[in-house]
Amino acid sequence: MSTTSDRSPATDSDRLIQRPLPPELLLRGDNPFSPPPGLDRLHERAAVSPVELLNGARIWMVTGFDESRAVLTDDRFSADTHRHPNAMQLTPNQVVQQRATAAAGRGGCPVTEQPRNDGLFIFMDPPEQTRLRRLLVGQFTVRRMRALETRVREITVEHIEAMRAAGPRADLVSAFALPLPSLVICELLGVAYEDRAEFQERSAVAVNLHASDEERLHAQAGLYEFMRGLVADKRAHPADDLISGLVHGDADPPLTDAELVDISTMLLGAGHETTANMLALGTYALLEHPRQLDALRADPGLIDTAVEELLRYLSVIHTGPVRVAVEDLALGDVTIPAGDTVMISVPAANRDSGQWSDPAELDLTRTRNHHLAFGHGVHQCLGQQLARVELRIGLAELLARLPGLRLDASADEIGLRTGMIIYGVHSLPVTWD
């Protein structure tokens, strides 16, 4: 018997391209606060445009605000990547095979009918998504959110005072922007804070588009192993936290361990990555826009509108959300065929001149700022109110307690997270008086 494998070595065409968007639609490091110029040019031509991916597939890029909201509220666009794989998930060989199938008259929207037994609710459609989301909404109680707001302020003050004691210089990311939401989400979920370094490191690798497939898979496996242990601990030792509430709640049928691990992993990652990057990048944006910063310092009552404007202006989710059309339908001035992938560009939609005047300008006094930073429709971010609390308290206390806060490096020395799913800065050296 031969000892060699009959399987041919994998070629580049067999591999998933982690960043399949063309380079002109990807973030660059020379302008920290603006979408890629290619997105602007795309939006100038049309609100919905065809885009050729590096894997050879075609998607539809949605840059218009109204069109983006339409996609996010239309159940003919599926978020279910299990039943409707999108073009971003295909290797070049799979794209070729899919086109051959379509040319032979066997095209259409690919559907996998197997029932879902996971908890990845952000990649589900109703009614499966509705069941899990309803259970989660029940855990975000008014009492729990009020208690967390008190803790957010305590944690914020503790970290700023620690910076002051060690100052007058610090890296705002490691000293403040990352630990604040990390500690808050740990308390919400019932994760021991001393374990935060492990999940922070693994989640950072999992969303790093420059990491290899092996590195990302290893990081994801580590996160899931961590969460399996946590769910088992909450079954045996329930406490007053969100995971315990889900484990011992009145779900019918009860949530399985697989569902609980998926839900907890998504909440833990989303609860610290996005807010941490908004805190650091938001501070950077304020420091680079001195007139806006002076206005906020002169009138701290602007903080609520300031937070909403920073969320709109920065839009730290730069790739997606992604949907697949389950039937032929019209969107804007084009017809989207069944099975085609649609990607919403949140940064472009949040700078649609049809929705805002001077959308490329940071204006902390904007009102009625109905941006898409937290999404829209049935998949709108569950933790958006907690994120707003963290941003409002975090930014206000920074400016109040660190007089003369300013950058301690030139702008070209600030390392931008252009290769990450969630945009931000790797570090932000600051100093104060």
Image (cartoon, rainbow, N blue to C red):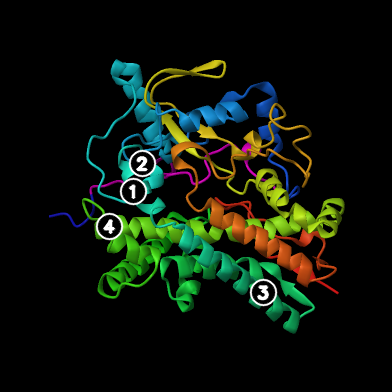
Asked whether 32 or 272 is in front, the reply is 272
Which residue is disc 2 drawn over?
124
User: How much space separates mark 3 and mark 2, taking CA atoms?
Assistant: 39 Å
**Along the viewing direction, whichever of 287 and 28 lies nearer the viewer:** 287
Q: Which residue is the extreme one toward the front? A: 143
Tag 1: amino acid: Leu
Start and end of the magenta stretch?
A: 6-28
Q: CA distance from mark 1 to mark 4?
A: 13 Å
Q: Which mark is residue 336?
A: none
Mark 1 falls on what kind of element?
A: helix
| Rendered residue at 57%/56% (across/down) | 387
Instruction: State the CA–CA distance, disc 1 to disc 2.
Output: 10 Å
Q: Which residue is mark 3?
A: 157
Asked if residue 27 is positioned above or below residue 223 in the image, the reply reads: above
Q: CA distance from mark 1 to mark 3?
A: 35 Å
Q: Which mark is residue 132?
A: 1
Disc 1 and disc 2 in contact, CB within 8 angstroms:
yes
User: Of marks 3 and 2, which one's residue comes earlier in the chain?
Assistant: 2
Please name the amino acid that badge 3 sits on. Answer: Val
Of labels 3 and 2, the one closer to you = 3
Give the amino acid at mark 4. Answer: Ala
Q: Which mark is residue 258?
A: 4
Q: Reading the chain from its start, which is encountered first: label 1 or label 2?
A: 2
